[in-house]
Every structure is written in structure tokens, then in C-alpha cells.
């Protein structure tokens, strides 16, 4: 009879500030929770601009906003952060380190250089990367230090493989279903659209606001988040009582707003490697209207789990939103299909897949 495999000590390393909402940060923290639920010891290491978001986080210091992929990302490439990381890895004696965005400046790069434990790296980014283009040779060397490389989508594979070479295991991003399925819906009095994201050009909020001009006067829009375009877009919609600016919201409010909305809109223009936020909306049983991006199509298949429209086409976006808000049969069909789809991408399932890869990395690791 085979002996049961022992629990693992896993260090999950995030280059981005864990106190600032983001897709990668959410994946890292959620995966750690699922690993702990399976009986493994999982600790998250990353910068924090304030108190750590949960007790399983080792903060590495404050972040520095850095331009990347059309956005501003909160990284911590400074020497004190690297020294904190090295000390934490030495003290914790991890069986394996799981680096998210392993070429991100900061602790992930430090881990690749020092290789203090077997390394699994997950590449999230898609689209274009100036860093990959201009620092290809050093980054290829760093990527070669990884024992196993993973990507979250075909687009992420294309970016990484084009510039870094190597072979990649494709794994989906995961979602913690319960917080969204069991959230108390935020009350509404009118048909309500929800937008959630950073207010910058690539997220397409400006296109959604343009589409609002073609929608009936009783439609309400919740706009959550903030960003460099916030003030300009607020001025553009001044006097339109249908648009409610929520500002940054926490995870509990996000789940409640999703449960309360009649449709979730993701009008991004580019740069989305995987639609985790679409899965969250599906888990909250809200229908989806999204841009036709390959990362989104991985999650919401056209006219099955969502209505998909050309990026930047305000008229098509308005038509799709109007259809969901006026046709209850379509809305119910999308909600039912979306709920089933969300269960296919559960974080617990993803954690099981990663544990297999962790053990492979440990078995194959050579100092």
C-alpha cells in the first residue's frame, strides 16, 4: 500500500502589492487559501502598502508604481524588499516556490537568480511587453532557472514563448466560488449595469459611457474602481444621474454589487490574458456582456455564457446590453450557463493541479 504524500510547504511569490486589488494578486491569495484547505502550508510573499490582507502574508515592503502593459503596476524592486525576501525564504524552508509573473522586477527575479528551492513560474501577461523585447537575453536566462513554466492562456503562452522560449503547461486561472454565490445582493430600483476595473484606456470604460447614450433613461450604471481617466470621465458624464461612481470597493462589496446587478459589462480594448472577473460575475449569477478578446472568449463563449461584441464598438455594446436588460429569457439563459461554467474553473480544482506540478518540480529539481 503506497504511503500518503506529506503536505508541502509552499511559498507563493507575487511581484505586485497585495494590498492593491488586481487579477494576479487575487489569484495568488485565493490559491494560497485553497492550498491551506487541502492541508498544505502556504505562505504568500509580496509587497504590501499597508496591513497585509490576511494572516498568511509575509510583507516585503511598500511598492513603487511602474508603467507596464498600458497600466501602472505596484512593484517592489528595491534592495530592502529583496533582503526581506531572502530572509523569509531562509527562515521558512519552503519545499517549493511558486512565482507569479516570474519576470516581474522584485522578489520573483531574485528567486530566479538565487534558486533557493524548486521553482514553478506562472506567466499571466498577454499582448506586448517592452521589457521582454528589450531585455530578452537576460530574461531568457532567468526563465531558464524555472523548473516548470505555466501560462494562464494561449495569449500568455504566445507572449512568453516568443520572447523567452521554453515549454509551458497551460492552466486556467481559478475562482473562489462561495463568496460570490452567497453574497447578499446590493438592492437596485432600476435595471443596473456594473463596471469594475481600473479607469484607463485599455479597460474601455469610455466606450461603455458612450454606449450609455443609446440606452433607455431608466438604465443605471455602477462604475467601480479608479484610475488616470477617472476625473476626465466624470466631467464627461457630469449631469447624468444614471451613472453612479463608486470609487474603489473591497471584495465583499464587489460580490454584493455583482449579485445585485442585472448585467456585468467588461468592455476592455486589449491586454486581457484571462477573464477572471467574468468568472466572478458568472459565480454571482449575473449575465455578461464583454469585448471580443481571446482571453475573454476562453471564459465566456459567444452567446453561451455571454454576449460578445467587437472591442471599441459603442453601438454594438449598447445593443448587447439592451438585449440582456430587456430580454429576461436571454438573461436567464446566460446566467444558468455562466454558473455552470464558473464551477469548471474553481480555485480548489486549480490548487489540485498545481500540487501535482509542485511535486514534479521537487522531484526533478537539480541544484
Image: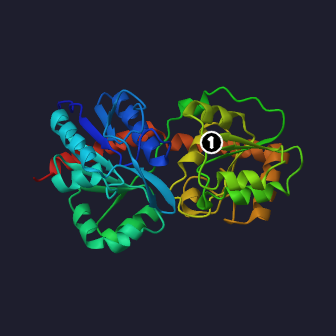
In the rendered image of this protein, does residue 116 appear above or below residue 128?
above
Residue 207 image point, x, y percent: 72, 60
Colouring mode (rainbow / by chain / secondary structure / one colour): rainbow
Which percent across, then down, holds residue 113? Answer: 19, 56
| 89 or 263, nearer to the observer | 89
Could you tell me which secondary element the residue under label 1 belongs to?
helix
Along the line of sight, the residue nearer the viewer: 137 or 332: 137
Q: Is residue 180 visible?
A: yes
Extreme-left residue of the structure: 367
Image side of residue 63 versus residue 334, left or right: left
Q: Residue at x 82, y 52 (%)?
A: 322
Q: Residue at x 73, y 56 (%)?
A: 208
Give the percent coordinates (x, y) of residue 104. Answer: 34, 56
Residue 127 location (% of width, % of height):
48, 67
Q: Is residue 59 above or below residue 15?
A: above
Is 246 on the left-hand or right-hand side of 237?
left
Give the labeled residue for mark 1: 281
* Residue at screen point 52% across, 63% down: 70
Image quadrant containing the N terminus? top left
Near-viewer residue (317 or 221): 221
One can see residue 320 in this view? no
| Image: 201 above or below 1 | below
Amino acid at each position: 500500500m503506497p504511503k500518503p504524500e506529506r503536505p508541502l510547504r509552499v511559498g507563493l511569490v507575487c511581484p505586485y502589492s497585495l494590498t492593491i486589488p488586481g487579477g494576479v494578486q487575487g489569484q495568488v491569495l485565493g490559491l494560497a487559501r485553497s492550498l491551506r484547505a487541502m492541508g498544505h502550508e502556504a505562505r504568500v510573499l509580496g509587497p504590501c502598502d499597508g496591513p497585509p490582507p490576511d494572516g498568511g502574508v509575509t510583507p516585503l515592503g511598500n511598492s513603487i508604481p511602474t508603467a507596464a502593459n498600458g497600466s501602472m503596476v505596484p512593484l517592489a524592486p528595491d534592495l530592502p524588499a529583496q533582503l526581506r525576501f531572502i530572509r523569509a525564504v531562509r527562515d521558512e524552508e519552503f519545499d517549493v516556490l511558486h512565482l507569479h509573473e516570474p519576470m516581474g522586477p522584485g522578489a520573483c527575479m531574485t528567486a530566479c537568480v538565487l534558486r533557493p528551492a524548486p521553482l514553478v513560474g506562472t506567466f499571466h501577461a498577454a499582448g506586448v511587453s517592452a521589457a521582454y523585447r528589450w531585455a530578452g537575453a537576460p530574461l531568457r536566462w532567468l526563465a531558464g532557472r524555472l523548473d516548470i513554466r505555466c501560462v494562464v492562456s494561449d495569449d500568455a503562452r504566445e507572449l512568453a514563448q516568443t520572447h523567452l522560449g521554453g515549454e509551458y503547461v497551460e492552466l486556467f486561472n481559478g475562482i473562489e466560488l462561495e463568496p460570490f454565490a452567497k453574497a447578499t445582493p446590493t438592492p437596485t430600483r432600476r435595471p443596473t449595469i456594473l463596471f469594475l476595473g481600473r479607469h484607463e484606456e485599455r479597460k474601455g470604460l469610455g466606450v461603455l459611457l458612450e454606449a450609455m447614450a443609446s440606452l433607455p433613461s431608466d438604465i443605471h450604471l455602477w462604475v467601480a474602481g479608479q484610475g488616470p481617466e477617472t476625473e476626465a470621465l466624470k466631467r464627461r458624464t457630469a449631469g447624468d444621474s444614471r451613472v453612479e461612481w463608486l470609487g474603489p470597493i473591497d471584495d465583499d462589496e464587489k460580490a454584493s454589487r455583482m449579485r445585485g446587478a442585472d448585467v456585468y459589462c467588461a468592455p476592455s480594448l486589449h491586454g486581457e490574458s484571462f477573464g477572471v472577473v467574468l468568472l466572478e460575475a458568472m459565480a454571482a449569477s449575473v449575465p455578461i456582456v464583454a469585448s471580443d478578446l481571446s482571453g475573454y472568449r476562453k471564459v465566456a463563449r459567444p452567446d453561451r455564457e455571454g454576449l460578445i461584441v467587437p472591442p471599441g464598438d459603442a453601438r454594438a455594446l449598447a445593443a448587447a446590453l439592451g438585449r440582456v436588460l430587456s430580454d429576461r429569457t436571454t438573461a436567464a439563459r446566460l446566467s444558468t450557463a455562466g454558473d455552470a461554467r464558473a464551477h469548471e474553473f474553481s480555485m480548489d480544482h486549480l490548487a489540485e493541479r498545481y500540487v501535482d506540478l509542485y511535486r514534479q518540480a521537487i522531484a526533478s529539481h537539480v541544484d
